[in-house]
Every structure is written in structure tokens, then in C-alpha cells.
Amino acid sequence: MAELYDRYSSVVYAVALRVLGDTGAAEDVLQEVLLQLWRKPSAFDAARGSLGSWLAVITRNRAIDSLRKRRPETDIEDVVLSVAPDLAGEAERARAAEKVRGVMGSMAPAQRSALEMAYWQGMSHSEIADKTGEPLGTVKTRIRAGLIVLRKAFQT
Amino acid sequence: MSEHERYAEDLALYALDALWGEDRAQVDEHLATCAACRRELEQLRGDTALLALSTTGPRPPQRARQRLLDAVAREARTPKVMQTSTRRSWWGWLGWAATAAVVIFALSLWRENSELKGSLASASSQAAKSARDVEEIRRIAAPILEPEAQRVTLVAAKTPPQPQGKVFYLRNRSSLVLLANNLPALPAQKAYELWLIPTNGAPIPAGVFKPDAHGSASVVNPPLPAGAEAKAFAITVENEAGSATPTMPLVMMGAGE
């Protein structure tokens, strides 16, 4: 567990802190996510993805649940993702972060902000549509298209 | 608009955990029968991981590490596992670790099976076949999983208890389970470390662990490089933070059976 902590705590904490903006709450999510993995290691299936990516997704979802004060809807065992970079090393993460920022920077501002509101604030598409005054369908399309742009940038 | 296109945008929201109520139920229903959309959902989650992993920030405070290790130690002292006999034994945690191993195996089989069959059969017959396969795995695994199963370790008669370790390693999935028992207690600040000895190159750390009061311990799915070919496994005593290279002597060692 100590090894797991040393390798992944900075990723988990950074994600939780970005969502919650509060160090105490981020620390609680860090503790909860790693304890859940310890209690139920079978939830993570090494054949289908990297542990770093999986933890990042679980952490973001838990942090959003905590931000919105709602009960977790998705069991961690149901979160399966396709192989994505592990980025356990600081240098790899810094390079990937730079690349993601570059891709986000090249998106149209409305698309970038829709994706960021959905991802980092956990806003639903209808909340985003209310806030921006755009049609629901447009918001949905922007969110999906934004994710696909990111995917393509890492496939090349 | 094809069935998949109809769900494409909702799948992105689903991957963000931002789809609720009736919309979510509809997607769940579709996912149950559509391997292509399940794959797309996994891919979209991978895309969201890129966003998450790109965040950088300060490291967590030092106290967070100790807080987690304390919580783990507390839970380890009061394991929520099924004890199958009045005799205190190492089967409680073996049941847990074996369950983990079987569940990982069953899940991966189920997924592989549903993908392979996807191109051959209709969605419904595929789901039925997957369910039968899972049932078959459950039946085979019942003597390991069921709490009422009687479990006995046999050793040569009149042999004092010896430290024992068993490693189960699936190279193509980088999946590993170690079950050990009768391990001698360790001094404070020391822990056991498992090593994968590859055919070529230096030993690879495969998990740091401490035995419980009965000398039992397990390691389940430590982080391992993909596809490492194991010639043997060994256990050393290290500082509890673990080591990058083994400190001699090897306290336990075994080559492939």
C-alpha cells in the first residue's frame, strides 16, 4: 500500500484538489479512493487499462460526488476504461499535461468551456445549456467532440 | 441515424458520470446488449482520464500517507472476511484473495468472451452465452469461494509448520496473486517484499507486504511491467517502504512449476 501511495497519491490528490479546490476535502477523497482499492483490489482489471488512468477517473468521479454532495452512483467495479497512458512518472505526466493543455487551447472557446464545466465542475448538459443559453443538443455534441479531439491527439 | 449514433453523445455524458435518470437507464439497457457501445464507453473513459491525468498540483501533505497506512493497518487487524472454522487459520484471507483472483479472472473471461462472440452471434445469444460461462466459472470456483466449503492444508505428517508461499501469475495480463502463510514475524519498520525474477534483467519489485498475527499475507495485482517473463519468484526482508533492489538473503524462493 505504501508503494501504491508513493506512486499514485500525487495524481489522485491533484485531480481531487482541482475539482474541490479545498486541501482537506481533497485529502479525504485521496484516502477514500486508495482505501477502496485496498479493500477491493479486484475492482481494477489490469488487462483493460493502466492503474494511474483508472485511479484518475475514479478520483474525478468521487470528487464530483463530494462537490455535489450526492451519493456515488457508479460502483468502482463498473468503471472500466480502455488502455490509456499510465503517466506514473512525473516527467511523463508533465509532458502529457502540456499536450492536453495545448489541445484544449486549440479548441473553440465554447467547446473548451463546455468540456471543462462538465469535467471539472460536474455540471450536467442541461445546467451547461442553461448557463450558456445554448441548445441542449449543441452542448452534448461539444462535449463528445471535445473528448474525441483529445483522443485523436494522443493516437498520433 | 444508426443505433450507435443515437447513443454516441449520451455515452460521452455517461463516461463523465453526468447522465442521470431515464436517459441513463436507457443507455444501461443498450449497453447490456451492445459490445460496440461498451467498447466506445471504455474508450471515452480513457479520454476523460487524459483530462484528469493532465492536472498537476502540489503533493499531498505528509500526514496523508500516514493516515492512509494507519487506516489500512486498522482494517487489517479487523478483517471483514469469512472465517470458516472455529480454528483461527489463514483461510479467512485466503478466501478473500482467492475471491479477488477468481473475480478478476471471471471478469476478464467474460469481457473477452463477449468481444469474441460479438462478430459471430446476435447480441442476445452472446449475453446468454456469457452468462452461462460466468455460471460455469462460479461452479468451478464454488469450493474456493463458498464460506461453508471445508478447507484443509495437507503437509507431511509430524512436520512443524513451515513458511509457505504460492504465486499465481498470468503474464499476458500482468496479473499476480501471492498467498503466503506461517511467515515469521518481522521487526518494526521491516516488511517482506516479493520479487519477480525475470528471464533477463534485474529482479522486479512485485509488492511489499506484512504478515498478520498468524503469519498470513497476500499480495494481489501489484504494479508490474507488461508481459514480464518470470523465471522465478523470491521474497526478501526490506524496510517497510520497500526497495528497488532485493536485499540478501532471499528468505523464500521458487521457480515455475
Image (cartoon, coloured by chain):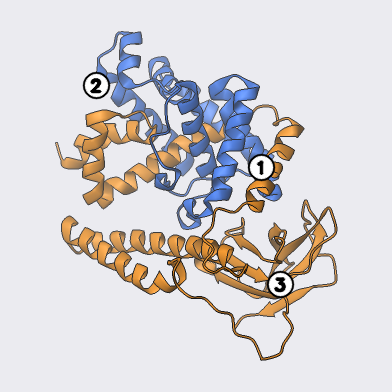
For residue A16, say whether it is visible.
yes
Q: Nearer the viewer, residue B220 or A126?
A: B220
The chain displayed blue equals A
- Helix or strand or loop: what does disc 1 sit on? helix
Please tell me whether mark 2 or mark 3 is closer to you in this view.
3
Q: CA distance from mark 2 to mark 3?
A: 62 Å
Tag 3 residue: B182
- Which corner quadrant of the image does residue A32 belong to? top right
* Vertical order, B75 against A12 (above or below): below
Q: Vertical placement of B186 versus A11: above or below? A: below
Q: Residues within 10 Å of mark 1 (few under 14, many from 20)?
A: few
- In three-dimensional space, the C-alpha distance between marks 2 and 1, rounded to whole angstroms, equals 45 Å
**What kind of residue is marked 2?**
Gly
Q: Which mark is residue A137?
A: 2
The answer to whether residue B122 of the structure is visible from this angle is no
Mark 1 belongs to which amino acid?
Answer: Ala
Q: Chain of mark 1?
A: B
